[in-house]
Amino acid sequence: MKKSLSQPLLGAHLSIAGGFEQAIYAARNLGCTAVQFFSKSNRQWHAPAITDEQLARYHEALRVAPLGYVAIHASYLINIASGDETQRTKARNALITEYQRAVTLDVDALIVHPGSYGTGTIQASLAHVAQELNLVFQETPAGNPKLLLETMAGQGTNTCFTFEQLATILNAVAPTSPIGVCLDTCHVYAAGYDLKNNYNGVITLFNSIIGLNNLYAIHLNDSKKGLGTRVDRHEHIGEGQLGLATFAALMNDPRLAHLPKILETPKDTADDDARNLKTIRDLLD
Ligand SMILES: [Zn+2]
Ligand SMILES: [Zn+2]
């Protein structure tokens, strides 16, 4: 069972190679209180059924790990924003499967990239996302986990790189399960929100357009690329364009203190996660 913890919820995206329990044990070894993983290969549609034995090993791991928050990141292939109905139907079915797996694994949230508008328009993509999410809600059990749309960098034809675009979707859905937003620090900066020089202004703007009450998780990533480049390249904490001061402000922001914060920083060497986690923990006042 996930635990009720007094410490901040802090963790990393970890691999399930060898079983779901491997992500949980790796999180424990890193001293994490939160974890995120893909519930299946993120670059394949195939989703093998979760067996009782796999589930038992996963629950045993959760029993001994001090985790207060578990999230699944949905496959990158899913594009419910597509103007192509066949592609959208395939994406919706895959998202329903992801949600069912999230229910089976009893996680707190399923985090989803809204997708790409391709040859269509941004406006149409927002209507497609809302419509597909409503269909997903109709096909899945009401209650938990939360479905979180991620703030995107706006690379290529990715949609949902402005707060207004995400707000449009939140206002258009009729959720039967809680829905909200996961803010990715690299993405919002690359999208043009200056977290580095105007941290408070960006969070205040997020609150006025989306509402901090709709913010449920944060992806902690520094950015290799500059403000407004709309290029999505994660960097180690403090080694990118955002820099340590930005993360110090975020980690000590009382408005965000209760939110799970998850690293998706590069894994160039085996100790990168431990190093980035230490960097982040050292910023806490
Ligand atoms: Zn993501
Ligand atoms: Zn990213």
Image (cartoon, rainbow, N blue to C red):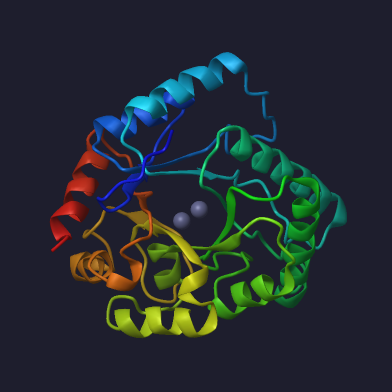
**Residue that lies at the very extreme toward the right in this rendered image:** 85
Residue in the foreground of this view, choosing between 279 and 32: 32
Q: Quadrant of residue 52?
A: top right
**Residue that lies at the very extreme toward the top in this rendered image:** 53
Vertical comparison of 92 with 114: above or below? above
Quarter of the image that includes the N terminus:
top left
Q: Residue at x 38, y 75 (%)?
A: 227
Q: Residue at x 69, y 35 (%)?
A: 45
Residue in the foreground of this view, choosing between 86 and 142: 142
Residue 262 falls left or right of residue 157: left
Q: Does residue 17 appear in the picture of this structure?
A: no
Residue 11 falls left or right of residue 18: left
Name the spot of residue 261 as percent of width and height, x first: 35, 55
**So how many labels did they put on this image?**
0
Residue 226 falls left or right of residue 238: right
Residue in the foreground of this view, choosing between 107 and 234: 107
Q: Quadrant of residue 93?
A: top right
Name the spot of residue 114 as percent of width and height, x first: 63, 60
Vertical comparison of 204 with 9: above or below? below
Name the spot of residue 219 as percent of width and height, x first: 40, 57
Q: Residue at x 41, y 78 (%)?
A: 193
Q: Does residue 116 appear in the picture of this structure?
A: yes
Q: Quadrant of residue 154?
A: bottom right
Name the spot of residue 240 as percent of width and height, x first: 27, 62
Quarter of the image that includes the C terminus:
bottom left
Vertical comparison of 92 with 238: above or below? above
Residue in the foreground of this view, choosing between 203 and 244: 203
